[in-house]
Amino acid sequence: MARLAAALLQLPNGLFVVQRRGAGSPFAPLKLGFFGADIGAHETPLIAVKRALAQETSLDVDNLQLEAVKEIDLPNNNGQEDIYIYVFKAQITSPDFEVYDGRPEVHPLEDIRSRIDLTNGLHIIMQHL
């Protein structure tokens, strides 16, 4: 079973910041994705999402208030490995931070839901929020 921790970053105006992956990204180049990672064997979902944000962005993760908002259980994911995603949300003040593999993009939730250029993980999350 794949266990993932994902962060949705929300601005004060209600818009969300997602990651546009770089052209050379080893995973889903040029797609819009969430910030997050696989959960390590000895990690909690919260620790994993903080680690991912620290590795993927210049955000100060020690000062982010991450709120668990959804758990998504996908057994037998279209004949693939089972997936369990822990989704967290954090309020941030600005999209002006560095993304180490790509760049941040700001979108309303409805726009993200209707896009066709999402990573599989972000697409799954949008179907369940």
Image (cartoon, rainbow, N blue to C red):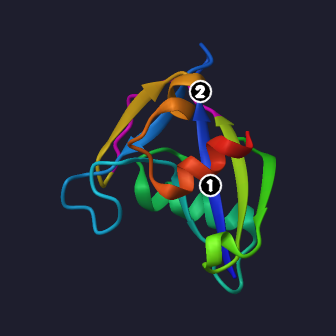
Dominant SS of magenta comes to loop
Q: Residue furthest left?
A: 24
Residue 54 image point, x, y percent: 49, 57
Q: Is residue 121 above or below residue 111?
A: below
Would you say residue 65 sits in the magenta stretch? no
The secondary element bearing badge 2 is classed as helix
Looking at the image, is mark 1 or mark 2 nearer the viewer? 2
Q: Quadrant of residue 80?
A: bottom right
Q: Is residue 116 left or right of residue 87?
A: left
- The residue carrying mark 1 is 6
Residue 123 image point, x, y percent: 55, 48
The quadrant of the rendering that contains the C terminus is top right
* Nearer to the camera, 79 or 29: 79
Q: Is residue 32 above or below residue 3?
A: above
For badge 2, the amino acid type reads Leu
Would you say residue 97 sits in the magenta stretch? yes
Residue 1 image point, x, y percent: 69, 82
Q: Quadrant of residue 9?
A: top right
- The residue carrying mark 2 is 109
> Does the image show residue 62?
no
